[in-house]
């Protein structure tokens, strides 16, 4: 099940979503060499990726972690390590990794940005991303394998989307058929599938779950407090009183988001 778009219109261009995608792709193309050089890719993952054991100091200094043929990441105590919960969010391990994350961020991020505003969305994105990485660290504090990717932050975006618009229709590719499915179904299935991740796949599924839950909790707090853009009127959809569910599109809405 691959989300392609949704039926929620946005009121403004998703500037911050585009900027986040631009920074992520610049890191992939120029810092990581687009994955064409195994040495460059391994160096970026080793030096700027998140290594739980380095943060917690529970991994032995000097230990080598194989990253490919003839290459190893050496556990160190460099000052940059404290920033890796942030830096790792903008790095990826391969083309499918960055393409998948970019698609999910584009589909779900623009509406969250519309709700929170560009600055609010950036703060939210970085917050849930760091919480997701810390969840990964807590699950295995002595782990030595570097972790990279925006998946945790994007999972947080998806969690917030579920809270704000559970009835929105997500245009999803199921095998070869494009179906408009309720967001609650698409995101619920995605969340449950995380618990079935192969332990040997090197997928940081705990970070996904932690980020998703963090996004849900933040969105619940914002909704209860009447957060940014609460009660805003969407085209052909009058706003309701504070506390109403005017954020949701009517069932089977045919509106198309002009920004994807």
Image (tube, rainbow, N blue to C red):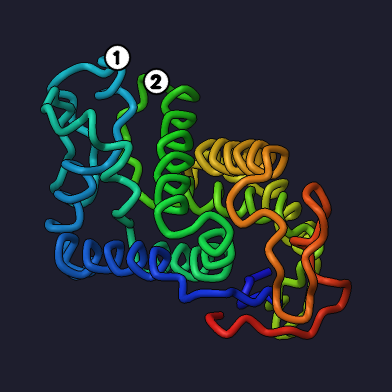
Using the image as rendered, state which of residue 121 and residue 46 is in the foreground.
121
Image coordinates for residue 169, horizontal then vertical, percent = 76, 72
**Left or right: residue 131 compared with residue 53:** right
The residue positioned 56% from the left and 36% from the top of the image is: 210
Residue 214 falls in image quadrant: top right
Q: Earlier in the sequence, mark 1 or mark 2?
A: 1
Residue 60 falls in image quadrant: top left
Image coordinates for residue 83, horizontal then vertical, percent = 23, 35
Q: Are marks 1 and 2 in contact (CB under 8 Å)?
A: yes
The residue to which callout 2 is attached is 141
Q: Is residue 8 above or below residue 193?
A: below
Q: Is residue 5 above or below residue 254?
A: above
The residue to which callout 1 is attached is 58
Q: Is residue 93 above or below residue 1?
A: above
Q: Residue furthest front?
A: 241
| Residue 196 visible to an observer of this rendering | no
Report how far apart the C-alphas of labels 1 and 2 lie in the structure: 7 Å
Using the image as rendered, state which of residue 89 and residue 190 is in the foreground.
89
Q: Residue furthest right?
A: 251
The residue positioned 74% from the left and 61% from the top of the image is: 247
| Residue 11 visible to an observer of this rendering | yes
Element at label 1: loop
């Amino acid at each position: 099940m691959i989300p392609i778009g949704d039926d929620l219109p946005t009121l403004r261009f998703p500037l911050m979503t585009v900027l986040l995608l631009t920074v992520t792709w610049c890191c992939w193309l120029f810092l990581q060499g687009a994955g064409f050089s195994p040495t460059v890719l391994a160096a970026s993952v080793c030096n700027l990726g998140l290594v739980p054991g380095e943060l917690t100091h529970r991994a032995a200094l000097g230990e080598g972690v194989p990253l490919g043929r003839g290459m190893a990441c050496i556990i160190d105590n460099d000052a940059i390590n404290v920033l890796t919960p942030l830096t790792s969010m903008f790095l990826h391990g391969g083309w499918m990794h960055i393409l998948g994350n970019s698609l999910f961020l584009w589909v779900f991020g623009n509406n969250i940005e519309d709700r929170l505003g560009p600055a609010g969305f950036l703060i939210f994105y970085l917050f849930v991303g760091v919480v997701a990485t810390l969840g990964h660290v807590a699950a295995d504090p002595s782990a030595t394998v570097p972790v990279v990717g925006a998946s945790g932050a994007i999972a947080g975006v998806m969690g917030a989307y579920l809270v704000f618009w559970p009835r929105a229709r997500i245009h999803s590719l199921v095998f070869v058929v494009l179906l408009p499915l309720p967001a609650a179904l698409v995101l619920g299935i995605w969340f449950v599938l995380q618990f079935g991740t192969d332990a040997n796949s090197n997928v940081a599924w705990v970070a996904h779950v932690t980020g998703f839950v963090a996004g849900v909790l933040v969105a619940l707090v914002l909704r209860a407090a009447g957060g940014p853009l609460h009660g805003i009127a969407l085209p052909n959809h009058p706003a309701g009183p504070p506390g109403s569910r005017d954020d949701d599109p009517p069932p089977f809405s045919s509106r198309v988001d002009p920004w994807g």
